[in-house]
Amino acid sequence: MRKKNKVALIIILIAVVAGATSWALIKKNNAKPDCDTTDPANLNGECKVDLSSIQSATSTSTAQNPTPTSTTAANFSDLYHNAQYGFDLTFNSAWKGYTVSRKSEDKAEAVYDIGIPTKDSNITNGIAVPLTVKIFNKADYQANSTLTKITENATYVFVYSIWEQAPSDAAVTEKDIANVISTFKLN
């Protein structure tokens, strides 16, 4: 009887250790990205995080040759994290080399132009802006036909607009823009 109890105890301990390890790996992979807001590249609490190296908890690949098994890691390449206003956007490979620049605009709390590199001579400074995200204080927000509401929280209303005309060499399509908007998440 004692031998059966020891075997049962060992099996329970193995199950507990395996469960705790799986939980820790899943929690690590679902954690919000670390953002060094003292780094000039991360002004205003914004982070651009390369997801291509993130592997799911079930991945068996080596660190030298990562092969993501997670659908998210396989289909998307970059996560943009804005700590100041508490939102994330995920960009697929069509957005390679994207930039995020903040500008001021009357009545908006913040305006973020999300640009992509272009060689189209009609585009000034080589950056086309397929997507603009605007953040309004709830008290200042008024619905507008050129802006589409994404969501809101207790303090802000988040809206977006898209480019009127894409550059001739645009890799980003309207479907890519819609996909990015669909990844918008409040923290």
Image (cartoon, rainbow, N blue to C red):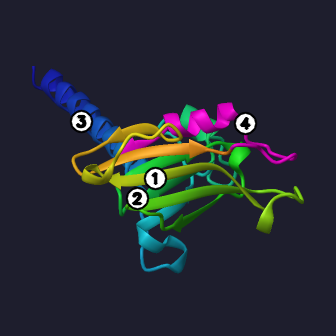
Say whether marks 1 and 3 touch (CB < 8 Å).
no
Mark 4 vs mark 3: in front: 4
Mark 1 vs mark 4: in front: 1
Say whether marks 2 and 1 touch (CB < 8 Å).
yes
The N terminus lies in which quarter of the figure? top left
> Which residue is tagged 3?
16
> Which residue is tagged 4?
173
Horizontal and vertical percent position of residue 25: 39, 45
- Residue 134 - label: 1
> Tag 1: Cα neighbours inside 10 Å, few (<14), some, or many (≥20)?
many
Q: Counting residues from the N terminus, which is met first, the one under dot 1 or under dot 4?
A: 1
SS at badge 1: strand
Question: What segment carries the magenta color?
Answer: 164-187
Say whether marks 1 and 4 touch (CB < 8 Å).
no
> Which residue is tagged 2?
108
Q: Residue at x 65, y 42 (%)?
A: 92
Horizontal and vertical percent position of residue 58: 50, 35
Q: Is residue 59 visible?
A: no
SS at badge 3: helix
How far separated are the C-alphas under marks 1 and 3? 47 Å
Mark 1 vs mark 3: in front: 1
